[in-house]
Amino acid sequence: MLSASRFYADLRESWGYEPSFDGSLIAWWGVRGTRRVVFVGETGRGMPRVIARFYGSIIHFSWRGYANRLLLTEGDRLFEVDPRYPSRRVDITPQGFQSWQIVSEPTSAGGPQAVISHDRSPFFTDLYQTRDDGTGKTLLEDNSGRTESWLLDGAQRPCLRVEHGEDGARRFLARTADEEGSETWNEIAALGVDETMIVWSVDPDGSRYEALSNHGRDKIALVSIEPSTGNKAVIASSEDVDILDAVRFNPARQTDLVIMRDCYPTVVPVSERGAVFSRLLADMGEHADFEVTGASSDGRFVTAAVSIEAQQPRPVLFDLVKGKMVRLGREPRALPETTVAPVIVTTRDGEELRAILTRAKGSNEPMPAVVVAHGGPARHDHYGFHRDHAFLASRGYAVLSVNYRGSTGFGKRFQALGFRQFGRAMQDDLADAAIWLIDEKIAEAGRIVIQGESFGGTIAALAMCRDPDLFAAAIIDCAVLDLPFQMRNNPLEWTMVTDKVEQYFGAASGTDAEALLEYSPLDQVDRAHGSFLLTASVSDPIVSVEQTRQYESALRSAGRNVVTRYFEGEGHGYTKWQTRLARARAIELFLAETIGGTSKKIDWRTRLATYWN
């Protein structure tokens, strides 16, 4: 049996490959000793030849869009460096800001870049412009307090803004000019709280937008929009699922392809280069899933992490002009093969839930199982490689990840079915998923665990208050466990999306407050049964760690079996490999004790993870 460290601390692993401006260089994350490092190499016919390594507290890297210069983010500072002279770092942090985020990169040396900042208010951002060296701070748009976002044209000028109306509608305003050259902001669309329109690209001259939108339809489609009229034309759509994944290899050009995720992923090219990429991807194998990690400025060279049949992904460099590809990085240490398949679970009221079933390859007999509820709830799980699920499958568990009602990806109607249904129909969906596992002879009754992170942890906790013979235990990560408290103390930056949050949970006052209290996990501890593994980050900025601590205390007072892990240096969710490794080991031991799978008796690397930085 492979140790947890083989899944979460493989020192051979490399990831996040990104080609430079012209594709002659490439940067990526890797490991040197036990330290995370940014490597830079020269591209050629085969593997990149390393020319520089960057150590330190780097949290992000990217390339200039007009030169082979690497940008490194360390804490709140931004540095530019020529990889051929790695010791010469230039601080180009935007000057005059306490908080900043670059939202549009300069396209030429000395050119302008767009920066948003929360300095004036934690509730909204203002839009600024600086030069590429961080100097020359200039205010572009002074937020009235209702602007959610801006879209900039090729000249770095705001050409579209999204306003949060007093009536709750999201109003899309396009900057247009009349025959005399006078510019005004004209409304081209007004969306209700249940509608989506993400305008994500604009032609350089601002004459055409592209967006992912379900305005006036049930499913999200890729559409083009004429700014002066707001008229939309469908570029790509599906009758069965939302299009949530659209890819453009060159930010200044139109969309290259979309991915339709109904069961297995289907890549639909909408440009010539998208067609080349799609063909190369198909040549790699059946049921290919991928994540684009970078592209050269002209869109010729594209890097992506590619997974075939939902197995461990490999980084690949695509040359879309020559129609060739090169696998990057050393071959990772092999992980046990899994069988990953989309399945349909029919609920007690006739709804069809898309779910993903993961098992060790060759497993056929009934086995202990884990039902996974994703967070959000405005999210969804889809087919592809999932490290946590592969790890559980290697320990002898079937893993069923369920898109319960309220999940995104399947249209407005299905999402609306989940509004205010925590503790009610959402719980029925999770129970029906567990029953499906038993009926299909995949899982054994009495040996099923429910697992969830964030809101998924909320409904996992609520599942332990019902159906005492269905779920034996729960794994609950960084979860909302005191619903009334959370709805009164959501992050300030959520101010403009409060209406979307209240769709699911209701308001913190009035009649909705009664349901928040009635179905809050902390107030249902006396009905809870089974065993619990609770984890949380002590610095979580979204869900306070106190909620987990109070829930732990209440469970212990009620005599329940509780195991806890609290992690330092994390946010809402876990990104450090040390944390993910320690959490995986805790889950492995917890499941072996509660529903009987297998676990490695000794894993010394996991014990040392706390001391590795």
Image (cartoon, grey):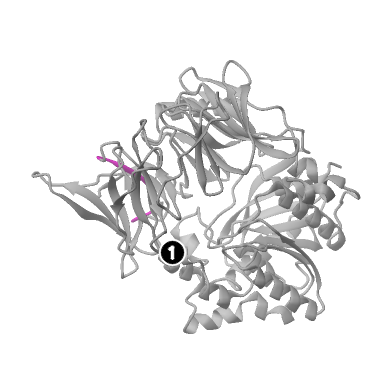
Q: Which residue is mark 1?
A: 122
Query: In the rendered structure, which amino acid carries the disc numbered 1?
Result: Pro
* Residue 387: in magenta span: no
User: At 51% across and 45% down in the image, what residue appears?
Assistant: 77
Whether residue 238 sits left or right of residue 559 in the image: it is: left
State which quarter of the image contains the N terminus. top right
Q: Is residue 424 above or below residue 176?
A: below
Q: Which x, y percent locates residue 303?
A: 54, 30
Judge whether residue 147 can be spotted in this image.
yes
* Residue 214: in magenta span: yes
- In the orientation shown, which residue stands out farthest toward the right? 601
Judge whether residue 212 can be spotted in this image.
no
Q: Residues within 10 Å of mark 1 (few under 14, many from 20)?
A: few
Q: Is residue 276 above or below residue 255?
A: above
Q: Which residues are magenta?
A: 207-216
Q: Is residue 157 above or below residue 50?
A: below
Q: Which x, y percent locates residue 370?
A: 74, 57
Whether residue 210 sits left or right of residue 544 in the image: it is: left
